[in-house]
Image (cartoon, rainbow, N blue to C red):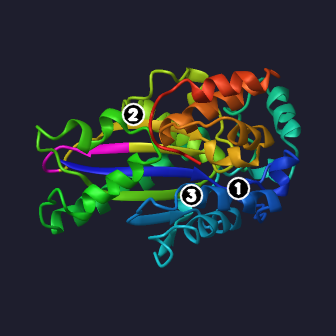
């Protein structure tokens, strides 16, 4: 069996993101001040994660995001980033540079709805999905080829370090070899891959994993959450398993979708909470709970709800 982790992150915010202007591929906008802060926050969150491979879209906003992430990482500062046009945002043709409201009006005028509508000169959802599939299959073949050239991993090999570094901040649970493979002899991770891409692209990739690979997702996720666009620097993590020989499709397990807990430091309520409440929670549980609270907070619930949500656990790792 060959196993590898895939962490997919959306780029940080640009000025046009905030103004709801469609960028696609033709508008190569840099990150805004907020976007650079988000990239740095993502880098701090991932600073102890060992990535063996790093890929990024070749557009400016993703290049700046991946740079912001890697400069904070303890192990990947000298890693070579491979920029790949297959990771670009969906092409929106005539709608690029125009407000999202105009794209919706264009769709309505022909009796269609977004995101299924394809503007003139744009890329269809099927074309976008095939582009994502092409990159993913390339990635799988790369990992399998490299794994076959390496010796069998032992418990003390780098593979176990790859997995443990992910397990420190993501809720791997039963997907973690160290927790459920001790008797089965299943290997650790052969690789840990970081990909920085775009909102519509990530949504399409999720659809590919869901419909084509029959990926298993956390039971708490709703269908709407699986089809929503990731927030800027939102993180989605998969564990891919190939049976011996690497033939056929991999078994895919999703660890989390559009995680954004690394941005909680920008929230004054969380800083106030930290100063007042001695929370000792595991990293993965805290960020899962904080994401739930962020969504809950949109309905103007009191901060006490967040305190209850964050502190209703009894793990021993001090996250702050």
Is residue 36 in view?
A: yes
Pair 1/2: label in front? 1
Kindly identify the residue that appears in the image at 55 percent across and 33 percent down: 288
Pair 3/2: label in front? 3
Kindly identify the residue that appears in the image at 64 percent across and 53 percent down: 89
In three-dimensional space, the C-alpha distance between marks 1 and 3, rounded to whole angstroms, equals 13 Å
Kindly identify the residue that appears in the image at 21 percent across and 62 percent down: 147
- Closer to the N terminus: mark 1 or mark 2? 1
| Residue at image mark 1 | 38
For numbered disc 1, what is the local secondary structure? helix
Q: Position of residue 14 (x, y in %)?
A: 79, 57
Q: Does the magenta stretch include residue 196?
A: no
- Closer to the N terminus: mark 1 or mark 3? 1
Would you place residue 87 above or below residue 76 in this image?
A: above
| Residue at image mark 2 | 212
| Residue at image mark 3 | 196
Mark 2 nearby-residue class (10 Å; few <14, some 14–19, many ≥20): few
Q: Position of residue 10 (x, y in %)?
A: 62, 51
- Closer to the N terminus: mark 3 or mark 2? 3
Is residue 137 in view?
A: no
Where are the magenta residues, as a range? 239-245
Would you place residue 57 above or below residue 291 in this image?
A: below
For numbered disc 2, what is the local secondary structure? loop
Q: Nearer the viewer, residue 248 or 293?
A: 293
Q: Which of 320 and 192 is in front in this view?
A: 320
């Amino acid at each position: 069996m060959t196993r590898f982790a895939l962490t997919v992150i959306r780029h940080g915010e640009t000025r046009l993101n905030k103004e709801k202007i469609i960028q696609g591929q033709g508008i190569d906008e840099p990150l805004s001040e907020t976007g650079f802060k988000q990239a740095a926050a993502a880098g701090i969150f991932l600073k102890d994660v060992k990535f063996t491979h790093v890929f990024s879209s070749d557009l400016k906003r993703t290049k700046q995001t991946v740079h912001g992430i890697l400069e904070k990482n303890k192990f990947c500062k000298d890693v070579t980033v491979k920029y790949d046009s297959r990771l670009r945002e969906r092409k929106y043709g005539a709608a690029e540079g125009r407000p999202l409201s105009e794209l919706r009006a264009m769709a309505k005028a022909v009796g269609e709805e977004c995101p299924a509508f394809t503007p003139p000169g744009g890329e269809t959802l099927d074309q976008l999905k095939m582009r994502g599939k092409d990159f993913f299959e390339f990635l799988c073949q790369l990992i399998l080829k490299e794994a076959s050239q390496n010796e069998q991993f032992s418990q003390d090999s780098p593979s176990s370090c790859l997995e443990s570094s992910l397990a420190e901040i993501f809720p791997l649970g039963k997907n973690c070899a160290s927790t459920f493979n001790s008797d089965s002899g299943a290997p650790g991770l052969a690789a840990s891959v970081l990909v920085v891409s775009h909102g519509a692209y990530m949504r399409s990739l999720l659809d590919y994993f869901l419909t084509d690979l029959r990926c298993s997702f956390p039971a708490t996720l709703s269908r709407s959450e699986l089809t929503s666009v990731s927030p800027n620097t939102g993180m989605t993590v998969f564990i891919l398993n190939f049976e011996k020989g690497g033939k056929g499709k991999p078994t895919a397990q999703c660890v989390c979708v559009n995680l954004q807990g690394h941005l909680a430091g920008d929230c004054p309520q969380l800083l106030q909470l930290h100063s007042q409440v001695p929370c000792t929670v595991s990293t993965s549980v805290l960020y899962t709970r904080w994401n739930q609270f962020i969504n809950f907070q949109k309905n103007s619930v009191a901060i006490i709800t967040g305190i209850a949500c964050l502190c209703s656990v009894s793990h021993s790792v001090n996250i702050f």
